[in-house]
Amino acid sequence: MASRQQCDTIWTGARLLPMTDPAAPATVIDDAVIAAHDGRIVFAGPAAAAPAFDAPRRIACDGRLVTPGLIDCHTHLVHGGNRAGEFEARLAGASYEDIARAGGGIASTTRATRAASEDELFAQSAPRLREMIACGATTIEIKSGYGLNLPAERAMLRVARALGAAHGVGVTTTFLGAHALPAEFAGRADAYIDEVVETMLPALAAEGLVDAVDAFCEGIAFTPAQVARVFHAARALGLPVKIHAEQLSNLGGAALAAGFGALSADHLEHLDGEGIAAMAKAGTVATLLPGAYYFTRETVPPPVAALRAAGVPIALATDCNPGTSPLTSLLLAMNMGATLFRLTVAECLAGVTINAARALGRSDIGRIAPGTWADLAVWDVAQPADLVYRIGARPLHARFWRGQ
């Protein structure tokens, strides 16, 4: 028997899915014990191997499945307004171009976001966050990118931090100033990138509001050369980078980002072999977004088999946003990843835990092991596959963030 260890909380009778072994991510430990002190795991394993903990708080899991808290590593959670009307118009036959000419699309979200106060943005975004929490999320990445000027981008990032503090959930903030070209810079994309790299990014980084920097590399957004300027500025400030790439076409954005050591490249439906090789060499995570693929009725899936063969880690996320993926459930994202992209159950589970953590540059979440945060999800399910198999279910029994 191991020596007694200090512990303030112990979970007993768990069927533990620790997600610590990438080679066997869906292996369950029956009759497991998890112990935590000051919010961090100090032991996780079979009860027979556990020290004789004398914890003041003991929680019986009664044979329920316990996994790491889920991680949503790509969201646009904070924004103003609602685009359900555009969805209805598309169902009636309107094209994206029709909607854009009528002032819709990202432009409409930008207007609504700029017009909202921070309190209004918080009030509109909080219900979306609560939906994510109800599906087991304990860490969420939230991007800016609908403000597209310094005051509104600042407001989005400040609200993202405030949401996390108010709801007991980890929030990482990503500056996505290079998301779309605002109307006031029409025809002047390079001038807008000047504003992003010379004004917005330095100011927001100095205020401590930026954990990572993202950019949208696409024909409807920004060129590889413009994205490279953003990434150079980010790295000069010591900030990691991420990219929206190869969603609608192949501009080589993933390979570009990998050259900057990107944490992740996201979407990737049109990713080619060169991009896959670059990501594998750099350790860049492929974050797949089946909600957007489903919602926009895409027909070219990301090259999962090639990513798998190259050993590129695969993450899954909701891409929660008002225009192309109004999705707030990582459970449904897993089902979509399995059904639409043919990911295995083990890949889906790793995609919202250990690989999602890697996509955020984090090693202290996404798995249940000594030293990691005690971010746990306790589920009323018979087996791990149930979390991927069920459509629209919410089998969460309890959720703990940093032990609470």
Image: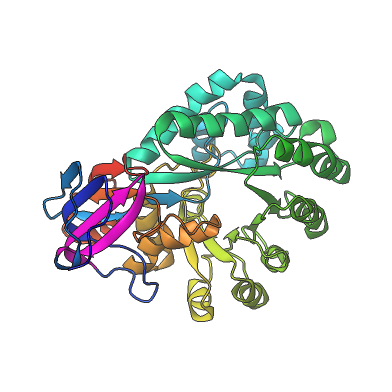
Q: Say if 58 sits above or below 267 in the image.
A: above
Residue at 72% of width from left, 34% of height from top?
148
User: Residue 313 location in percent, x, y?
Assistant: 50, 69
Residue at 47% of width from left, 34% of height from top?
164
Q: Which quadrant holds residue 180?
A: top right
Secondary structure mainly formed by the magenta segment: strand
Q: Is residue 249 left or right of residue 185?
A: left
Q: Which residues are magenta?
A: 28-47
The reply to whether residue 376 is in sight is yes
For the residue pair 364 and 134, the one nearer the viewer reads as: 364
For the residue pair 88 and 394, the one nearer the viewer reads as: 394
Q: Say if 367 sits above or below 211 in the image.
A: below
Q: Is residue 206 left or right of residue 93?
A: right
Q: Say if 294 sits above or below 1 in the image.
A: above
User: Residue 134 location in percent, x, y?
Assistant: 32, 39
Q: Which quadrant holds residue 16?
A: bottom left
User: Residue 282 location in percent, x, y?
Assistant: 64, 71
Quadrant the C terminus occupies: top left
User: Residue 72 location in percent, x, y?
Assistant: 46, 49
Q: Which quadrant holds residue 2?
A: bottom left
Colouring: rainbow
Q: Is residue 401 left or right of residue 153?
A: left
Q: Is residue 35 magenta?
A: yes
Quadrant the N terminus occupies: bottom left
Residue at 33% of width from left, 74% of height from top?
24
For the residue pair 60 and 358, the one nearer the viewer reads as: 60
The reply to whether residue 103 is in sight is no
